[in-house]
Amino acid sequence: MSLLEIKDLSIEFPAGENTVKAVSHVSFEIREGETFGIIGESGSGKSVIGLALLRLLPANAKVSGTVFFQGQDLLSLKPSELRKIRGKKISLMPQNPAGALNPVLKNGLQMEDVFEGNRAEKKEGMKKALKLMKQLFLRNPEKLCTLYPHQLSGGMRQRLTACISLSFEPEILIADEPTKGLDPEAKAGAVDIFNKIKTEYEKTMLLITHDLDLALEVCDQIAVMYAGEIVELDLASKVLSTPLHPYTKGLIRAQPRNGLVPLSGQSPSRIKLPEGCFFHERCRYSGFECSRKHPEIKNYKGGLIRCHFLSLK
């Protein structure tokens, strides 16, 4: 059963006399209990989708399509109705753990601020939060609450933001680049954290990341984004072990363990997208059809792919 259903989502931003097409006609579903991953280069539109779901984009963003959650279109709700969902039923674990916390407030106060209402509710909420902190591998949480964010390591800040995001026991957790800025040891610990959130807390998650190792370990399905659109979608194990799209293959070759072979060229301008396939100028399989006709996303070998079959031979 789908807990979140996104249909034909497009997001544009005005840029003077032009328009930046950040996301173009994206559709996917997240089933209850599933971890759905979105991967791609920086600027591919991953994080914009996460912010759009909770309507946290700038006021000048033009958003179209539908985002259904429990029978409600999140894009059509009144602000008062959305506040009942945002942070409670759908929670966001923001990008960059260091930047997500207020540097001038002690960690305990930032935890308390999550719990609205009277003093009794805050007290009960903090009891649950301290228990959650222990479960997410934070030692001596009582002392940690007396410290400031800068006194914590990168991994500890990440776990603290995870605790804040999970405090209201949301039905969906959106994690936006949770390993960004972390050292290798903290990144390795992130796998344990998200596996625990997935298996023990049985949370449905949307994981937005450029960390392919984390995506492979945690995600059930993965969508690969390029220039604002999905180019491949399938089971995580299939996408990251036997990729079909040339762009996905390039992402995997660019990993350090695979020789750190960078993708040639740059992503196209989102103001003036190229004719044909958006990736054709960087693709070593590109043919005549690729430069003239934009490929539709289609079913292929049990998944979805946006590519002319010439590239798949």
Image (spheres, rainbow, N blue to C red):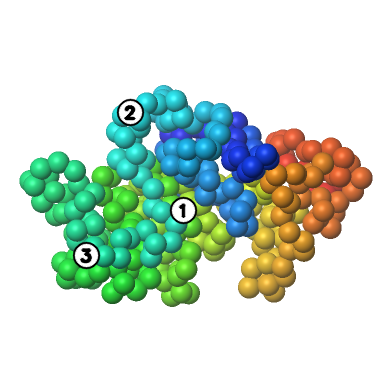
Q: Does 218 appear above or below 75? A: below
Task: Identify the amino acid type marked 3.
Answer: Lys
Kindly indicate whether the residue at mark 1 contacts the one at mark 3 (C-beta within 8 angstroms): no
Which is more N-terminal, label 2 or label 3? Answer: 2
Amino acid under disc 2: Glu
Q: Residues within 10 Å of mark 1 (few under 14, many from 20)?
A: many
Residue contact at pointers 1 and 2, CB within 8 angstroms:
no
The amino acid type found where label 1 is placed reads Asp
The residue carrying mark 1 is 176
Question: Mark 3 falls on what kind of element?
Answer: loop
Query: Which residue in the protein does label 2 denote?
Result: 81
Side of 77 relative to 63 (left or right): left
Q: State the SS at label 1.
A: strand
**Residue 63 falls in which quadrant of the image?**
top right
- Helix, strand or loop under label 2: helix
- Name the N-terminal-most of marks 3 and 1: 3
User: Going 87% across and 40% down the picture, which residue do you hit?
Assistant: 292
Residue 248 location in percent, x, y?
69, 55
Q: Which residue, given by chain and number where applicable, does mark 3 sit on? A: 106
- Is residue 290 among what the camera can see? yes
Which residue lies at the image location 74% right of the left edge and 35% below the top edge? Answer: 296
- Up the image or down, 223 lies above or below 81; here it is below
Q: Quadrant of the N terminus?
A: top left
Where on the picture, by quarter, is residue 12? top right
Q: Which of disc 2 and disc 1 is earlier in sequence?
A: 2
Which residue appears at 77% of the width and 61% of the height?
265
Between the residue at mark 3 and the residue at mark 1, the CA separation in whole angstroms equals 23 Å
